[in-house]
Amino acid sequence: MAIQQKLSLMIPGPTPVPEKVLQALGKHPIGHRTKEFQDLVERTTKNLKWLHQTKNDVLTITGSGTAAMEAAIINTLSKGDKVICGDNGKFGQRWVKVAKEFGLNVIKVDAKWGSPLNPESFKQILNDDFNKEIKAVILTHSETSTGVINDLQTISSHIIAHKKALSIIDCVTSIGACDVPVDEWGLDIVASGSQKGYMMPPGLSFVSMSQKAWQATEKSNLPKFYLDLKSYKKSILNNSNPYTPAVNLVFALDESLKMMKEEGLENIFKRHSRHKLAVSDAAITLNLKLFADKNHLSPSITAIELEDIDAEVFRKKIKEDYDILIAGGQDHLKGKIFRIGHLGYVNDRDIISVIAAISNTLLDMGKISCNQAGEALKIAMKDLKTI
Amino acid sequence: MAIQQKLSLMIPGPTPVPEKVLQALGKHPIGHRTKEFQDLVERTTKNLKWLHQTKNDVLTITGSGTAAMEAAIINTLSKGDKVICGDNGKFGQRWVKVAKEFGLNVIKVDAKWGSPLNPESFKQILNDDFNKEIKAVILTHSETSTGVINDLQTISSHIIAHKKALSIIDCVTSIGACDVPVDEWGLDIVASGSQKGYMMPPGLSFVSMSQKAWQATEKSNLPKFYLDLKSYKKSILNNSNPYTPAVNLVFALDESLKMMKEEGLENIFKRHSRHKLAVSDAAITLNLKLFADKNHLSPSITAIELEDIDAEVFRKKIKEDYDILIAGGQDHLKGKIFRIGHLGYVNDRDIISVIAAISNTLLDMGKISCNQAGEALKIAMKDLKTI
């Protein structure tokens, strides 16, 4: 078994990591109660706020994105609280599961997998909540399981109009991939994870907390210790952590945020946008069916439905022949779709490579003509040059 | 600020990390739902069992040691459950805090900081529990804040005699430093963290669970999601993880466990034992006062009490002059003690260096004679050669 060959990671996480970030990761650790580490925490916290486009606190947790999602709920809500959960994919479902585990009273707003959530459904329920019983609206911005992006800006405007409810948003595959202006959109709690747009390995997660979110923590009665965000807030005032953080991952975070600042938010968003466009246009040219609604394609992942080919066989062939790892479908979509991650440290060549690999595999299977393969590359190239 | 000079880490965590482990850490990540990663999980799980000397499940969590401690409690106990908590230092105190946060009914067995817990106190309470109301006995094996090791073997024998109560043990600074034969001592739940005897950076924690512990999970009604160990158990059957694990830290774990196997448990324990002896004998020779009871010195950390010198000033001088980072006292011991970590990837030269640095600093302050400094080195050398 060779762990390390020349793998191209095109799954929605872990995503590829730049050499500079890996080198930072591989440094000798330092003490986490030292001035040097405080300086690091100060800088990464400042840069996390930049990335979130917010003045809110952005806290770093050692744990996966799910830890950040759980933290959002257990710190601001109490057993029996009424909440709305958006559910149009596996990660929407996870929100429902977490909310129910902690005894919340969940009103589900769902949509078919592959379709976006309807902002009007949220508006309706929030408008009808005359007694202001709804404590939070919880949803996933970019639904990684289906490649759909939900209209967070509009949904957030309805939450703000309600005045009482908090917004709790999974931005795991949208932060660092498309515009998520936390302050401008008035998002209360935003959860994300390091192995995504952050161009880092997994192991850290992030929670952005508004003033309104902090106020809600005062009323929350759910038990918590490791994920008690008040202890993180208290520590961050001293650029520190309540428990030993994953020091080397913080080295990596520092480096990756520096690289993101050098590229600039607008360029990062443009890059993801053109990669999304190139992949989806090429797929259509290859007679492949996009699983997600064409007008709501996630900037970070494209899901493709295969009709007469087993998607697991297809993606295994791409892995074997080209050492490109693409993702399969989750749950009932296993074998039916494959998903191309174009999130984080991905360049134009990676996009052209995956399109070429898919085209070649379809050619090999006798599913397309050489002309179609060429057309797919041509349209992708055009997209890559125009944004 | 230079993060990376030639720092010698002699704090109780993060501990020094071997180059091979850092190199593994700095590799490009791979997909966590792949055969390659399953192979890694299979091997690390097998080697974790070897390290724990157990046939029990040993689960890996992305999070700090505190996450593992919380997991032990919330998975096996319910609100109102009666438990005994041993408290003779900061980490014992933390157990009490976690237990209380989750609504447990805590009977405290305490001892002065610097003294070991008295096994007889546990025996008494457990013997008197005729109705078998005590659900768990929770304690810290090696108390990092004071440098005391508690007599876990004897305490565990009393827990076993009770028949009903589970043992929940923080072995964060004992696993990989001294003998903790989980099966032989009948330990139900053992929590530990990567930045200690594992010779790894922080970010992973480990929980060993006996059959009796798994049975207790069926009755536990505390809410949990990220730290729900049943989902980890279900995943481990497939050599997988319920949520995206810190892939690169698992690369590092694989490498560090291989190194530990090459050295062998007996040699690892001997190394820690001779380092403990050398440091404590040298300290006494330098007229320094051991903070912990001489018969209960932790294999991983030696705490030294200073009478007419500010311990913070002392350790800052050692850092500035020799780039050796030693730890200060925590809470009320700040300024009163300093702590020398000799845990994990520490060799005889590191021990001689720290003794020489301390001796030189005391010489510089006019606190000892040259003869004493030489005697300290001599006795340390003798200890290093005899075990």
Image (cartoon, coloured by chain):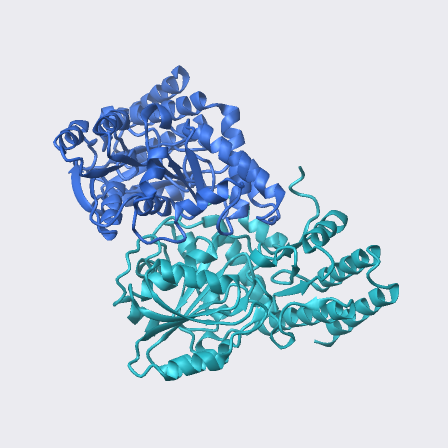
Chain colours: A blue, B cyan
Say left or right for A80 vs B128: left
Q: Quadrant of the N terminus of chain B?
A: top right
Splitting the image into 4 quarters, where does residue B310 fall? bottom right
Q: State the residue in front, B235 or B81.
A: B81
Above or below, comparing residue A217 to residue B261 in the picture: above
Residue A69, image x, y percentages: 33, 44
Residue at 31 percent across and 43 percent down: it is A76
Above or below, comparing residue B29 to residue B39 in the picture: above
Q: Quadrant of the C terminus of chain B?
A: bottom right
Residue at 65 percent across and 55 percent down: it is B335
Say left or right for A331 vs B282: left
Q: State the residue in front, A147 or B308.
A: B308
Residue A138, image x, y percentages: 25, 38
Residue A349, image x, y percentages: 45, 28
Q: Residue furthest top?
A: A386
Q: State the residue in front, B150 or A325.
A: B150
Say left or right for A331 vs B154: left
Residue at 30 percent across and 30 percent down: it is A298
Q: State the residue in front, B303 or B357.
A: B303
Residue B281, image x, y percentages: 73, 71
Mark yes or no: residue A321 visible: yes
